Amino acid sequence: MSRYDVLVIGAGPAGLAAAHAAVAHGAQVGLVDDNPLAGGQIWRGGPEQQQDQRAQRMWSDLRAAPNLTYLPQTRVLYAPAPQQLQVQTPSSSATLHYEKLILATGARERLLPFPGWTLPGVTGAGGLQALAKGGYPVQGKRVVVAGSGPLLLAVAATLRAKGAEIVAIIEQAALPALARFGFGLLATPSKITQSLQLAAQLKGVPYLRGSHVHSALGDGTLQSILVQRGGARELEALQCDYLACGYGLLPNVELAQALGCVTASNNRQTTVLVDDDQLTSVFGVYCAGEGTGVGGVDLALAEGRIAGLAATRQLTAARQLYPERARWKKFAARLERAFALRPELLKLAGDDTIVCRCEDVCHSELRTHTSWRSAKLQTRCGMGPCQGRICGGATELLYGWRPDAVRMPISPARIASIID
């Protein structure tokens, strides 16, 4: 089947919640995800494998629903016409038709360049977590988890459960900001429970506040890192086999932009603008989850349910969820304030530090340019396989650039998938 009343792109928490709400009201729903298993990054490994009962319940209902078509390992390439999306699977391609579209494309890690960040053994925090969940061996390996945000704790807990030795967790936010955030958790008791559980799992692991990784060192592979601790003048060396480093998340808005949805850039991230029912500026296209602003699984679930209900014209039921969404939006705002990036992080890259890893473009080659377009034309920055998804977040912080437009196809494609 290739025609749907509601087509949901992304099978993470927001997408599952949207599909679940739409299916429950009789719509023919298509659920598209580019991973082999549903769940997104939060519920990686499959919703049925999670301790979160919400994931298990939704997935059980969806798998039993006759009006749901699940399309795993399916990538969206472009929109050949209104209310159509061209997609590609490992073996074929197809055009999907829809009446309503819900974008739940999630977010990716923000990586910032520093000396040695391209050494083998330096990874994204969420990236190493995903590898470990997928069976990558980390048992007995010394791991430093660094960057900013609660994700660091979840990553460290996962890696420790897989047998890794967590040398330290390095958080760039200072103690006063962390204390204010902790006090604010009183408004969301479930988060206090999660925090206590993580604290128990990470007992004995050093947690370095107000600190950041200055550089990574090694002869061909990572061997140690230098850490700037608070106001200390001297750098501290830590021996490790892996450095899992991430500075928050960036919404995946490329598909929304390609469809003509209005976005806004503020607080150093670009988000899709939506109304109270999660409807974008394009009629019939909704957006839910991290695409509208990074806020965590609870906000994603609330937004997904509202989008699914609104797309099936259940507006009264959707409005009943507004207070829940508002509560989690306040949590997201506190999260953003507490873990705002320190300006020192933007001064770590040296002249020879690679910023664009795909095309090996260094900081010294980029800082003289005034725009993303100029840098692309002169240095090929952002023109590699990732299409600026990695270096784009860094260049926005380092130089204030923003990409001009989304290039088609959105994902790497076979020639046969884009030629009739």
Image (tube, rainbow, N blue to C red):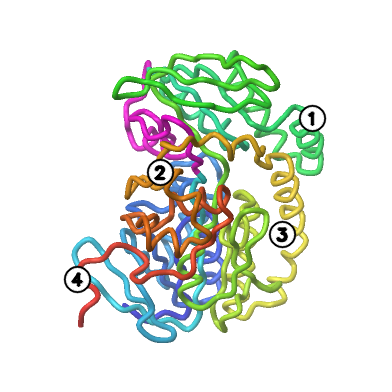
User: Measuring 61% from the left and 72% from the top, which residue is drawn there?
Assistant: 309
Mark 4 and mark 1: Cα distance apart in space: 54 Å
Mark 2 and mark 4: Cα distance apart in space: 32 Å
Label 1 sits on residue: 176
Q: Nearer the viewer, residue 83 or 29?
A: 83
Q: How crowded is mark 3: few (under 14 residues within 10 Å), some or many (20 or more)?
A: many
In this rendering, the label closer to the viewer, 3 or 2: 2
Q: Earlier in the sequence, mark 4 or mark 1?
A: 1
Q: Give the range drawn in magenta.
A: 111-140
Are the residues tagged 4 and 3 within 8 Å (C-beta)? no
Q: How crowded is mark 2: few (under 14 residues within 10 Å), some or many (20 or more)?
A: many
Identify which amino acid the numbered label 3 is placed on: Arg
Label 2 sits on residue: 362
Q: Tag 1's secondary structure?
A: helix
Identify which amino acid the numbered label 4 is placed on: Ile
- Left or right for 350, reference 293: left
Identify which amino acid the numbered label 1 is placed on: Pro
**In the picture, residue 389 is in which quadrant?**
bottom left
Q: Which of marks 2 and 1 is nearer the N terminus?
A: 1
Residue 136 in picture, x, y percent from top left: 32, 31
Label 4 sits on residue: 415
Does the image show residue 284? yes
Mark 3 and mark 1: Cα distance apart in space: 27 Å
Identify which amino acid the numbered label 2 is placed on: Cys
Q: Vertical placement of 305 versus 391: above or below?
A: below
Magenta-colored stretch includes residue 107:
no
Q: Tag 2's secondary structure?
A: strand
Q: Nearer the viewer, residue 225 or 250?
A: 225
User: Measuring 27% from the left and 75% from the top, which residue is drawn there?
Assistant: 94
Label 3 sits on residue: 325
